[in-house]
Amino acid sequence: MTFKQACEKTMGHPLAEALQWHIDNGVDVAVGDVAVNRTVARAAEPPKASELKPAEPKHAEPGIAITGSFAALRQKAVDAAAAANTLEGLREAIRVYDGLEVKRTATNLVFADGNPKARVMVIGEAPGADEDRQGLPFVGVSGQLLDKMFECIGLSRREEDPAKAIYISNILNWRPPGNRTPTEAEISLAMPFIERHIALVAPKYVVLMGAVAAKGILDMDQAISRLRGKFYDHPSGAKLLPTYHPSFLLRTPLQKKKAWQDLLLLSDALKDK
Ligand code: URA
């Protein structure tokens, strides 16, 4: 039976409709082998000793594999990132790091794209479905807008000249299931790797696309609308420029004007050097 025949045969079946409803709502990955019916209230049972986790509520979120204490997982990330002395070494350190549950549901590691000698590094949030399939950041619709935005100021990920190139990565290198926003705990575990990534590339400017990248790297809790539009100092000496994420701009085209102002700030700064 062809896929089309199978679809026709199951069309109208309540299970097929339930599956389509989940896909339409972004639930396109099975994260466990056993389905959990969350509509049925569970009788309050005392937890088994093996279910007890360290009392660290901020980090005890779903999506994180708590195999030891959160602090141990975080220390492991810090050590693994610090031990990487090349970009290839860092890619491998991220690939083998086991603290992030999202690794298990992702298809590919999405490490980076572009020219690692670029003066400008661009950091997004996390890969989506297209990026997960191809193993490259910003290759879907928001990536097409990102490329156009930078091409308007003469910068491209395909450029060999470091003065005209960009290098692109994300805070999180694995796709969160259903494209959900990374949790605070995931961001915390990913930070040592992206900080090491910045240190190894040593760009002059880092453009932080969207709230997750801006708040993560700046460690500030203000809205992206307040953070954007000015440069901040990074300990590496790079200048950080937060701006709107291209997928936000696709949903809210009126804000493109502000993103364009941010890119002009970057373009002027690059001319001064
Ligand atoms: N959005 C991001 O933040 N990063 C990608 O790589 C793709 C979409």
Image (spheres, grey):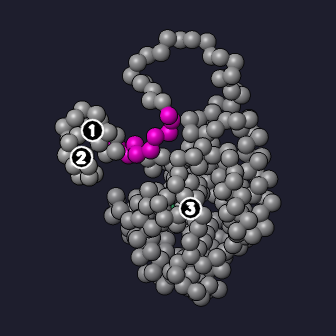
Q: Is mark 3 within 8 Å of ligand 1?
A: yes
- Looking at the rendered structure, the kind of residue marked 1 is Ala
Q: Earlier in the sequence, mark 3 or mark 2?
A: 2
User: Would you call the spot at circle 1 few (<14 residues within 10 Å), some (14-19), or many (20 or more)?
Assistant: some
Estimate the spatial distance between the alpha carbons at disc 3 and disc 1, rounded to whole Å: 32 Å
Q: Is residue 190 above or below residue 16?
A: below
- Looking at the rendered structure, the kind of residue marked 3 is Val
Q: Which residues are magenta?
A: 25-33
Q: Is mark 2 within 8 Å of ligand 1?
A: no
**Residue in front for this viewpoint, 63 or 20:** 20
Tell me if 147 is positioned left or right of 234 in this view. left
Look at mark 3 in the image and give the residue it sits on. 110
Residue 86 rendering spot, x and y as whole percentages:
75, 70
Tell me if 4 is positioned left or right of 206 in this view. left
Look at mark 2 in the image and give the residue it sits on. 7
**Residue in front for this viewpoint, 252 or 59:** 59
Q: Is residue 98 above or below residue 13?
A: below
Look at mark 1 in the image and give the residue it sits on. 16
Q: Earlier in the sequence, mark 2 or mark 1?
A: 2
Tell me if 54 is positioned left or right of 207 in this view. right
Residue 20 rendering spot, x and y as whole percentages:
29, 42
Query: Image point 40% across, 43% down: which residue?
Result: 27
Query: Image point 58% across, 74% down: which residue?
Result: 167
